[in-house]
Amino acid sequence: MPKSVDLLFIALSSPIMVGVYEKQKLIETVVSEEKSSEILPKIYKELSQKYNIEKLFYANGPGSFMSIKIAYIFLKSISVLKKIPLFAADAFYFNQNQPIKAIGKLCFVKISSEIKTQKFEIASEAIFKLPELLEYDEYSTISAPLYCIGAVG
């Protein structure tokens, strides 16, 4: 009988990271530089053949509009078809609340609980990290994407 696990997807930019969690502890990491539209189904297929997947988690934005959209549509479809619950947390949870590149010199920032854009002279690339422990209470059952597309200036 395969192990029961939860999967966490961070597919906001390259590289895509997927964490496999058994009893909320990270036991395996999958990292890919491929396009999310091509690699997410492959990763999911491999992991679903190896494990019994109980819950899905993902970073729902902000980040690359297309990456977020693809991850959400893919994971929401799996959630509905396989009856696996889907949960989300914003991207700032995975990068220690650092600015996330939007466009040009604009970055997304989280101040209190509000996500805004802010101009920086040098926009640093956000470094995302899978948590060692999957803290269920940090995730929401509201899994819709945080596209955060506002006026570009």
Image: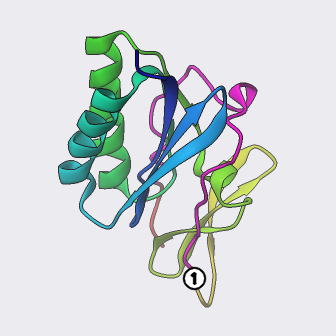
Nearest the eye: 117 or 142: 142
- Image label count: 1
15 left or right of 100? left
Most common secondary structure along the magenta stretch: loop
**Callout 1 crowding tier (Cα within 10 Å): few <14, some 14–19, many ≥20:** some
Vertical side of 146 occupied by 57: above or below:
above
> Is residue 141 magenta-colored?
yes
Question: In terms of secondary structure, where does tag 1 sit?
Answer: loop
Q: Position of residue 7 (x, y in %)?
A: 48, 34
| Residue drawn at the location 45% of the way across and 67% of the way down | 152
65 left or right of 39? right
> Is residue 67 magenta-colored?
no
117 left or right of 86? right
| Residue drawn at the location 46% of the way across and 60% of the way down | 151
| Residue 26: quadrant of the picture | top right
| Residue drawn at the location 41% of the way across and 21% of the way down | 2
Find the residue positioned furthest to the top.
83
| Residue drawn at the location 18% of the way across and 52% of the way down | 38
Nearest the eye: 29 or 80: 29
The residue range painted magenta reads 125-149
Q: Position of residue 37 (x, y in %)?
A: 21, 50
Determine which residue is flagged by label 1.
Answer: 123
| Residue 118: quadrant of the picture | bottom right
Find the residue positioned furthest to the right.
112
Quadrant location of the N terminus in the rendered image:
top left
Q: Position of residue 114 (x, y in %)?
A: 71, 46
Q: At label 1, which amino acid type do we have?
A: Ala
Vertical side of 41 occupied by 128: above or below:
below
Find the residue positioned furthest to the front.
1
